[in-house]
Image (cartoon, rainbow, N blue to C red):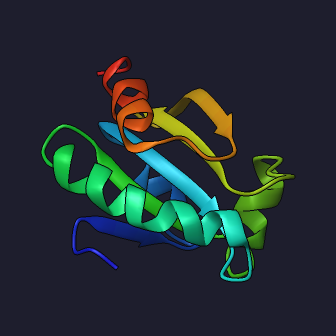
């Protein structure tokens, strides 16, 4: 996993999404589409470095956060701005689409 991507658990999810723009990827290791988007997110994290944070949340390990946020399909990506959800996408986006989606909330 790229050094530019952070990981969150139930315990630290709120603190890691509290400041700035954070793109959160809810995923599971067994999920094929989640594995497909992982290298795209690594590139996005490098390109957005300093502008936004990319955060991954394993729904099997952080089930409480996933349940509270009503994550019913993965991959689900949510953009947080200063701790508040501002946009949500279910499924895969390409690198260009992800970058412009995040930049539209800067």
In this picture, is 40 found above or below 5? above
Kindly identify the residue that appears in the image at 40 percent across and 57 percent down. Answer: 40
Q: Quadrant of residue 86?
A: top right
Kindly identify the residue that appears in the image at 68 percent across and 56 percent down. Answer: 75
Kindly identify the residue that appears in the image at 28 percent across and 21 percent down. Answer: 106
Q: Quadrant of residue 6?
A: bottom left
Position of 94 with respect to 96 (left or right) is: right
Q: Is residue 27 or residue 61 the one in the foreground?
A: 27
Q: Quadrant of residue 34?
A: bottom right
Q: Is residue 73 or residue 70 the one in the foreground?
A: 73
Q: Is residue 7 or residue 35 the one in the foreground?
A: 35
Q: Position of residue 59 (x, y in %)?
A: 71, 70
**Number of residue marks:** 0
Q: Quadrant of the N terminus?
A: bottom left
In this picture, is 52 found above or below 30? above
Position of 15 with respect to 29 (left or right) is: left
Q: Position of residue 41 (x, y in %)?
A: 40, 57
């Amino acid at each position: 996993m790229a050094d530019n991507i952070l990981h969150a658990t139930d315990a630290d999810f709120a603190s890691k999404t509290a400041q700035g723009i954070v793109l959160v990827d809810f995923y599971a290791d067994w999920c094929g589409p989640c594995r497909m988007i992982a290298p795209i997110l690594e590139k996005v994290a490098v390109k957005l470095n300093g502008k936004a944070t990319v955060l991954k949340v394993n729904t099997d390990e952080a089930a409480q956060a996933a349940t509270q946020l009503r994550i019913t399909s993965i991959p689900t990506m949510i953009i947080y701005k200063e701790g508040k959800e501002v946009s949500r996408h279910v499924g895969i986006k390409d690198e260009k689409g992800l970058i412009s989606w995040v930049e539209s909330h800067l």
